[in-house]
Amino acid sequence: MAWTPFFRLRRQRAYELRAEPLFQTAPIWRLLRVDSRCRLDLLAEVVVAAFGLSPANHLFVGANGLPSSWSSDGGESAQARLADVLRQPGEVLIYWHGGFGGAPYNLRLERQLPPGEGPLFDCLAGEGAHGAEQGFSLDAVRERLARFDGVPL
C-alpha cells in the first residue's frame, strides 16, 4: 500500500482562489471555490471551464513543493494536489494554458475555508469576458463548473 501524507487524510477544506490572466489590460478575474484535495490536472480543467477556454496542454510553475514545472504530460508530479503546493494565503501558482507558448494565469490563494457543505467547485464572483465568453455571467460559469460535481479528486 502506498504511503499517504497526513495532510491528505484530513477533512476536505475549500480554498478561495483568485484566478486572472496575466498581461491583460482589462480587469478579467474569477474568484473560485476549489477543494484543497484537487489534483493539478483537474484544477487546470476547472480554470479552463471558469474562463470558457478551449482544452489545451497545461503547465504549472512556481509554487511550494512543486518541481520547477508540472505538465499535463504526466509523470510523478501529475498526482500533485492543490494542498501540496499552496498552503498559505497570498501564495501563487502560475498556470500556463497551452504550455509555455500559451497564456499564463495567476492563481492566488486568497483564503482557506473550513470544511462545509456545498459544491466542491464554484465561482463566487468575477469580472470581464474571456476566451469564448461573450460577456461575464456568474450563472454561466457555475453551469460549466457543475460538471465537476462528483468527479474523483
Image (cartoon, helix red, strand yellow):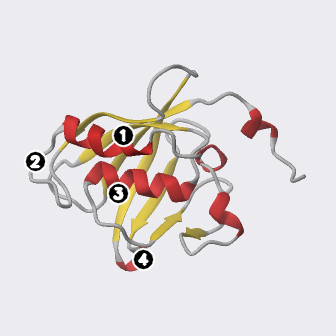
Q: Is the Cβ of the residue at disc 2 closer than 8 Å to that at disc 4?
A: no
Residue 66 seen from this side: no
Pinpoint residue 139: horizontal percent, then vertical percent.
Answer: 21, 35
Q: Give the Cα distance between marks 1 and 2.
A: 19 Å
Label located before the other in sequence (1 or 2): 2
Residue at 35% over, 67% down: 55
| Quarter of the view holding residue 148 | top left
Q: Which mark is residue 146?
A: 1
Query: Residue drawn at (46%, 59%), measured in percent from left and top?
Result: 94
Disc 1 marks which amino acid? Ala
Q: Secondary structure at mark 3?
A: helix
Task: Please say if 145 is above or below 94.
Answer: above
**Lower position in the chain sequence, tag 4 or tag 3:** 3
Q: Earlier in the sequence, mark 1 or mark 4?
A: 4
Name the residue carrying label 2. Answer: 135
- Give the amino acid at mark 2: Gly
Residue type indicated by callout 4:
Phe
Q: Which residue is mark 3?
A: 48
